[in-house]
Image: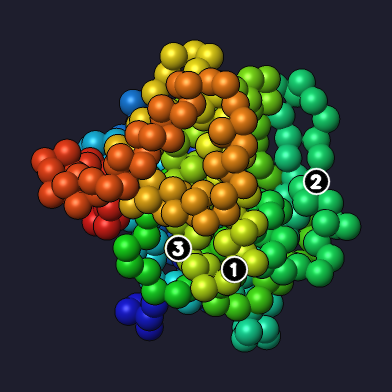
């Protein structure tokens, strides 16, 4: 019995969340289930007291809490991916270290659902959003009316699944991308590709909005968020294209999003003197070629660019074309090999 694998793995990433991690861990260990479960907590080299609290809970609940205390910061997605490789559960639930489960029956309810609905690979429930500083009223996401006719089409169009509300049927994982954001949206789509999406109309978790959160800046300054995360967000869309490459309908939806975000990056580069487009082409030459091929095929985007008077925009497009012609040289260069080490193309295994 001691060697029996857990039925559910809770995956939690944490970084400098000393204020919040205790509430998250407490909500995990107080779950009421008729099965064994584990909690993989990946601390991404926190510099505050987060590690100490995780270690405290691991000592108190050694059969449940499995800490991975990193000495080098990997980044949120690489940290998350490494935990997926380690997970032993038949089902996987997510909850970041600054959020928590608000219902101690959550794991039982969701695992029962997946037991009964064999064709489902994803199930989720609504989550209470709240502002830690009390500056705005709480709300529930998603609203019930948004959960009708759940399809992959709708999930590709927009993410309606909050991280702490989801449970997946484990697929067995390898070569997950590590330098993309938002990672949860990609993971939802990865699992939804293999089966149906189920909804449980019961609020069982809470999402905390606070200044330390990665998406907090989007509330007041979306432009700054694009400058910081736009390149990895664009990469996420291309990873989705790879997932659904045989479905022309889905590819069209995703490339519409890619074109819009690419335009935003070009605009910011022109106005602020940044190099977001250049950064993208260097870090993701394969995706650059995919983008160029699609733009040429669609043609309408090329016509829109020709209609513009801005020569700098055209020079950036020319740069992408140049990179596509020299892709083989890029891949054989030291830069490409160095990138593979830094950005963990095949996923962190540490």
Q: Which of marks 1 and 3 is nearer the N terminus?
A: 3
Instruction: State the residue position of label 3.
Output: 242
Question: Where residue 51 sits: x, y (%)?
Answer: 35, 37
Question: Where residue 22 sits: x, y (%)?
Answer: 51, 39
Per the model, the C-alpha gap separating discs 2 and 1 is 34 Å
Instruction: State the residue position of label 1.
Output: 248
Q: Which of marks 2 and 3 is in front?
A: 3
Q: Which of 335 and 181 is in front in this view?
A: 335
Query: Toward which corner of the image does residue 211 lie, by quadrant?
Result: top right
Instruction: State the residue position of label 2.
Output: 140
Relative side of 38 to 157, left or right: left
Secondary structure state at the residue bearing disc 2: strand
Q: How crowded is mark 3: few (under 14 residues within 10 Å), some or many (20 or more)?
A: few
Identify the residue at image location x=44%, y=54%.
Answer: 293
Q: Nearer the viewer, residue 329 or 137?
A: 329
Q: Quadrant of the N terminus?
A: bottom left
Q: Nearer the viewer, residue 19 or 262?
A: 262
């Amino acid at each position: 019995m001691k060697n029996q694998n857990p039925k559910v793995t809770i995956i939690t990433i944490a970084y400098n969340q000393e204020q919040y991690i205790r509430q998250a861990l407490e909500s995990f260990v107080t779950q009421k289930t008729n099965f064994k479960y584990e909690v993989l907590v990946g601390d991404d080299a926190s510099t505050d007291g987060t590690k100490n609290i995780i270690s405290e809970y691991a000592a108190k609940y050694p059969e449940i809490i499995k800490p991975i205390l990193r000495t080098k910061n990997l980044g949120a997605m690489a940290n998350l991916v490494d935990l997926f490789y380690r997970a032993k559960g038949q089902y996987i639930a997510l909850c970041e270290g600054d959020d928590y489960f608000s219902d101690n029956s959550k794991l039982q309810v969701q695992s029962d659902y997946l037991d009964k609905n064999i064709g489902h690979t994803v199930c989720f429930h609504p989550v209470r959003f709240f502002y830690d500083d009390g500056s705005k009223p709480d709300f529930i996401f998603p609203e019930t009316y948004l959960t009708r006719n759940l399809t992959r089409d709708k999930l590709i169009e927009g993410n309606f699944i909050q991280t702490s509300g989801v449970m997946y049927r484990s697929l067995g994982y390898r070569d997950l991308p590590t330098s993309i954001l938002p990672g949860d949206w990609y993971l939802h789509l990865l699992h939804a590709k293999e089966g149906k999406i189920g909804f449980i109309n019961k609020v069982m978790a809470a999402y905390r909005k606070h200044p330390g959160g990665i998406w907090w800046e989007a509330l007041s300054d979306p432009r700054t968020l694009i400058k910081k995360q736009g390149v990895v967000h664009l990469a996420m869309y291309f990873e989705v294209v790879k997932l659904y490459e045989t479905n022309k309908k889905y590819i069209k939806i995703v490339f519409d999003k890619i074109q819009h975000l690419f335009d935003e990056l070009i605009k910011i580069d022109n106005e602020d003197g940044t190099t977001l487009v250049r950064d993208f082409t260097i870090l993701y030459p394969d995706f650059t070629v995919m983008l160029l091929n699609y733009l040429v095929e669609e043609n309408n985007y090329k016509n829109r660019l020709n209609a513009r008077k801005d020569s700098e925009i055209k020079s950036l497009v020319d740069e992408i074309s140049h990179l596509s012609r020299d892709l083989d040289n890029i891949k054989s260069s030291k830069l490409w090999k160095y990138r593979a080490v830094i950005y963990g193309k095949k996923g962190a295994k540490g």
